[in-house]
Image: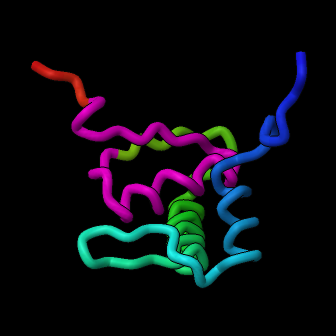
């Protein structure tokens, strides 16, 4: 089987590479809000630091329920890079009763 160039890539790693190369390019434009790749990476790192301060680490699981908005993107990207894993959910994936 052929292994593609992104076989070992993470979302965070790819984002960090783009931010290093083109940090001032817009990553997200939503509802009048504009985030560059550098700003998005900074938000992700700030969130990850907060999780670490709470004791979340390697092997821990994190469930996240946020809307499909820039905040959701910045909250679901970093945890895997810290050794924990996340399971982002939205209304589209929420169970119905």
The answer to which image quadrant residue 21 occupies is bottom right
Q: How is the image coloured?
A: rainbow
Image-quadrant location for residue 73: bottom left
Q: Is residue 67 placed above or below 97 in the rendered structure?
A: below
Is 55 above or below relative to 91? below
The residue lying furthest to the right in this view is 2
Please give the name of the residue rendered at 64% of the width and 47% of the height, measured from the top-left corner: 80
Residue drawn at 31 percent across, 45 percent down: 65
Which residue is at the far bottom? 24
Q: Is residue 38 left or right of residue 54?
A: right
Quarter that holds the N terminus? top right
Image point (87%, 28%), residue name? 3
Query: Please, which residue is most extreme toward the top here?
Result: 1
Q: Residue at 68% of width from left, 73% of height from top?
A: 19
State yes or no: residue 63 in magenta: no
User: Foreground: 30 or 94?
Assistant: 30
Report whether residue 53 is seen.
Answer: no
Foreground: 10 or 52? 10
Q: Quadrant of the C terminus?
A: top left
Residue 85 visible in image: yes
Q: Which residues are magenta?
A: 65-93
Q: Position of residue 10 (x, y in %)?
A: 70, 47
Q: Is residue 82 left or right of residue 61?
A: right
Q: Is residue 85 above or below residue 69?
A: above
Residue 5, given in percent of the width and then of the height, sits at: 84, 41
Residue lying furthest left = 97
Q: Is residue 20 left or right of residue 70?
A: right
Q: Is residue 79 magenta?
A: yes
Q: Is residue 91 left or right of residue 42?
A: left
Label count reads 0
């Amino acid at each position: 089987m052929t292994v593609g160039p992104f076989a070992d890539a993470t979302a965070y790693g790819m984002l960090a590479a783009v931010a290093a190369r083109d940090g001032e390019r817009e990553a997200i434009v939503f509802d009048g809000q504009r985030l560059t790749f550098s700003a998005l990476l900074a938000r992700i790192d700030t969130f990850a630091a907060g999780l670490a301060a709470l004791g979340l680490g390697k092997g821990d699981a994190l469930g996240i329920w946020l809307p499909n908005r820039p905040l959701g993107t910045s909250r679901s990207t970093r945890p895997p890079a810290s050794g924990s894993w996340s399971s982002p959910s939205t209304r589209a994936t929420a169970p119905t009763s």
